[in-house]
Amino acid sequence: AKKYYVRIRTYKGKKYSKWSKKKNIIIKPNKENHCTNNNNHSIKCGNMEKWFSSRDEIDKYWVEIDNYYFKQYQTGKITYEEYCKKSPYGYESWSCSYCGKWTGNFKYD
């Protein structure tokens, strides 16, 4: 009887086993270091320069920023033209495909 040797390829680890009579090998999955800081998410951080847990948090943050500049306008610290330049009129948002956190860009005139 002939002896056959097999070589197992695993697709997740992208490793070949050594030529042997073993039909199964165990490969420990590589832990990828994602989402530990702003530089290693699947997409770059927007001009908000923050990551949020949900889109609702982004909306609340946008309202806070708008209210901050509106109060400055009401008290006379800035003019209406400055208020229009500094306060964002909207935003676009996207999420990290690794951790699901949200960031985005404010839109200005």
Image (spheres, helix red, strand yellow):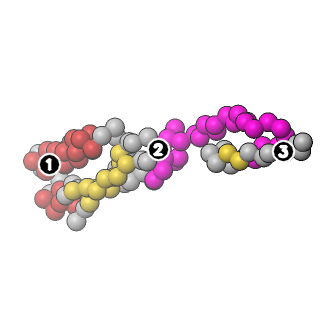
User: Which residue is tagged 2?
Assistant: 98
Q: Is residue 21 above or below residue 47?
A: above
Residue drawn at 70 percent across, 34 percent down? 26
Instruction: State whether residue 11 appears in this view.
Output: yes
Q: Which corner quadrant of the image does residue 25 belong to?
A: top right
Residue 33 lies within the magenta run = yes
Q: Please, what is the three-letter code of the amino acid marked with disc 2?
A: Tyr
Residue drawn at 68 percent across, 49 percent down? 14
Give the magenta range: 16-44
Residue drawn at 64 percent across, 48 percent down? 11
Residue drawn at 42 percent across, 47 percent down? 96
- Looking at the rendered image, the quarter that the N terminus falls into is top right
- The picture places residue 32, in percent across and down from the top left corner, at 59, 40
Picture disc at residue 70: 1
Picture disc at residue 5: 3
Of 61 and 55, the residue lying toward us? 55
